[in-house]
Image: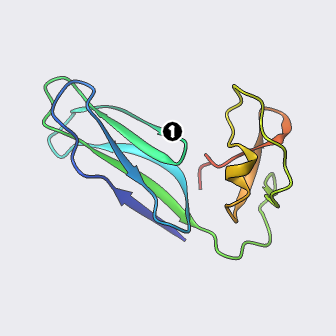
Amino acid sequence: SGRGALSRRSGSGDDAPVVAMCPAGTVLTGCTCFSPHGRHCDGARTHDDQCVAYNAAGGWGVYAQAQCVSMPGQTACPEGWAFNDGDVPPCAVGDWCQQAAAAASIDACARRCNGNPACLSFSWDV
């Protein structure tokens, strides 16, 4: 099931960052920036298991919105996905993937990425 997490408000400086994190037992699947004052977002990105949003110059502060999915007891995966059994070696530096040590603690489906079957990614659209 899906749920979200909203950060506190960022500072008002140019590119002031703010972080939203998913609750325990969920996986980060998306990240957006929200500004209640119009177009004051200067982007958002995922970094590890965090959603980071940035305030634009002249903005009054923005919020990071993390999209999170709970997958308890996942035993089957959709086509194109592989179940992470924790037996995958670490990814090469520079790959857009999670390290196996981090991935092994997450009971979730993971897309294999960069054509490298040793890599598991937890940044997918649901």
Looking at the rendered structure, the secondary structure element under dot 1 is: strand
Q: Position of residue 104 (x, y in %)?
A: 74, 57
Q: Residue at x 35, y 38 (%)?
A: 53
Quadrant housing residue 56: top left
Q: Is residue 110 above or below residue 34?
A: below
Binning the other alpha carbons within 10 Å of mark 1 as few (below 14), some (14 to 19) or many (20 upward) gives few
Q: Is residue 89 above or below residue 22?
A: above
Q: Position of residue 1 (x, y in %)?
A: 55, 71
Amino acid type of the residue that numbered disc 1 sits on in the rendered structure: His
Q: Residue at x 13, y 25 (%)?
A: 58
Q: Which residue is mark 1?
A: 47
User: Which residue in the rendered view is the most extreme toward the front?
Assistant: 101
User: Which residue in the rendered view is the most extreme toward the bottom?
Assistant: 73
Is 60 on the left or on the right of 111, as rendered? left
Q: Position of residue 100 (x, y in %)?
A: 75, 47
Q: Is residue 46 above or below residue 106?
A: above
Q: Residue at x 73, y 53 (%)?
A: 110
